[in-house]
Image (cartoon, rainbow, N blue to C red):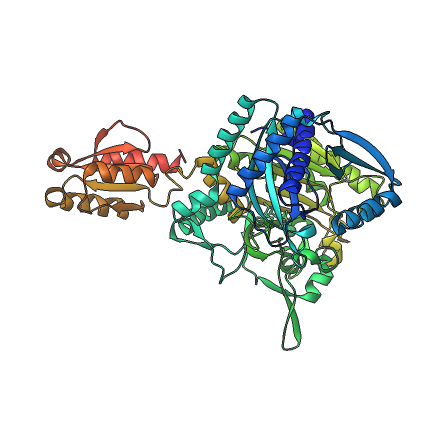
Amino acid sequence: MINIKEDEKLSVLNHSCAHLMAQAIKHLYPNTKFWVGPVISEGFYYDIDLENKKLNEDDLKIIEKEMKKISKDGKKIIRHEISKEEALKKFQDDPYKIDLINEMENETVISCYTQGDFTDLCRGPHVESVKEIKCFKLLKVSGAYYKGDSKNKMLQRIYGVAFYNEEDLTAYLTELEEAKERDHRKIGSALNIFMSHDLVGKGMPLWLPNGALIRKELENYIYEKEQKMGYFHVYTPCVGTVDLYKTSGHWDHYKENMFPSMKVDEEEFVLRPMNCPHHMLIYSNEIHSYRDLPIRIGEFATDFRYEASGAVKGLERVRCMCQNDAHLFVTPEQIGEEFKKVVSLILEVYKDFGIKNYKFRLSLRDPKDKEKYFDDDTMWNEAENKLREVLNDFGCDYQEAIGEAAFYGPKLDVEVKPAVGPEITLSTCQLDFLLPRRFNLFYINSNGEKQTPVVIHRAIFGTFDRFTAFIIEETKGAFPLWLAPVQINIIPVNNEYHLEYAKTIQKLLEENKIRVKLDDRNEKLSYKMRESQTKKIPISLIIGDQEKENKTISYRLFKSQETTTLNLDEFLEFVNQKIKNKD
Ligand code: TSB
Ligand code: ZN
């Protein structure tokens, strides 16, 4: 799907369209006040204050109509510059604009754009005339807190998109519809994977039995891989004391992402946002020699993070999440080798899941920024070069992002595009030179001296929540056999004659740990087959006279019209192979 923000011409057009929309709204609702109207990857939005009028879909149509009218009028869009004082005076009745002007600390001259009877503050650029803005669509309206802060007033955010011709707009809208169909929130609810409830809270999804089965399979899958790679898995509490997070530095650097603390007796706890501190303490529980390293501590660990209420999204961005986390304690010499193993694991996992569209992003320090990054140029240079070397050895394409490293070290993120909304990070692998120092961690080196290990934080799935959201969208809910909550649907043609044999097959498959469902409702075969498709069950068995007589089964794969008949042993072998190969 095209990213409007990355296309220069379309960005300008969409920005101008936001102004056109604002002008139309002003015509229809003269008291409206406007906050900001930026271009985003999907088009544009404008945050507006309409006091008590709540816009709905029909209102959007009326606004569109007014926009068409203004566009036809064809007024020029004219830029003019005024001083800050003039701007403050001109917009004195508009607290939002005053706020904006005051935020422009470094600007002495402020630019405005005028089209007919409408003027807005704006850096521009814009198209030359409103005539050019002909092909557009207002997509939706939702609530958005002023400045994204839930303590502020709730404004209305109207989204729209504009193109230079009708064909592009139609193609885009079709793609958008398809993306909505793929949205994990829609599929997740239709396939009973997860739910939310106000009584539990925002960003706190409940995993339903189907979702829980998928998650368990994901856990087993990655656990087995990590075990083979020499990881130890632990369980630790999902709270820690404030002192723990003061020691780690999160209290100073990460507090705005944390839930507020709570007092219990004499202790002050926080719901943990990360598991690193707990794992540091587990490392420090024993004295390690350089021969013991790397030590790899893994955990499927529940974390809580404060995410803005407007940002939470299904399973993709939650406030309570479970990380596929691990902290690897290595000697400085082992960084390259261990990092290589992590990248190799990421590549292996993505291959198993058939994930092809992803980008590696290597976040490095800005060597000039001595304030953000701790000052050890040699250490940074060595580490960054090692990471580059590994990525080059694998032949991975990657983007370097200067100045985006964490304050404690460089990191590699894997980014993917969800069906709806901006890119997200799935896997992450982060080098950390600081945390081990803060916890006074050491190992005994070959000279018998204490030395500080380096820590690699890594999460292959990221969180089970986000990964599941992504896999739902990748597969459109048609999970591969090994992951599917119900793997086989057994459909007797006629309960009276075939149910008993169908039950024998059910028992056999269940004994082989295959997840089956027996559809013994008195419904027509065609009806049951259709439902099997709607529920996206990978294999449907049709059990009729012939199957019963010959002790065989006939199956159809999801979306296929072809029926294949096998004897029971052959079928079991076929299914087991498919599961084993993660087909
Ligand atoms: C990898 N301490 C490290 C850990 O050792 C850490 O917490 N890194 S993180 O902050 O980048 O989070 C790990 C992963 O969690 C991210 O890569 C992302 O995939 C996932 N994640 C982050 N925030 C959310 C969220 N709000 N909802 C769902 N998943 C999230
Ligand atoms: Zn960590």
State the count of labels: 0
Q: Quarter-wise, where is residue 5 in the image?
A: top right
Q: Residue furthest bottom?
A: 265
Q: Quarter-wise, where is residue 67 in the image?
A: top right
* Viewer-nearest residue: 486 or 5: 5
Q: Quadrant of the C terminus?
A: top left
* Viewer-nearest residue: 131 or 491: 131
> Is residue 119 in view from this perspective?
yes
- Residue 221 in picture, x, y percent from top left: 46, 44
> Is residue 572 in view from this perspective?
no
- Residue 203 in picture, x, y percent from top left: 54, 54
> Looking at the picture, does residue 12 appear above or below residue 294?
above
Horizontally, residue 522 falls left or right of residue 198, namely: left
Q: Residue at x 55, y 38 (%)?
A: 62
Q: Residue at x 14, y 46 (%)?
A: 500
- Residue 389 in picture, x, y percent from top left: 70, 31
Q: Residue at x 42, y 51 (%)?
A: 212
- Residue 30 in picture, x, y percent from top left: 67, 45
Horizontally, residue 141 falls left or right of residue 102, namely: left
> Looking at the picture, does residue 210 appear above or below residue 475?
below
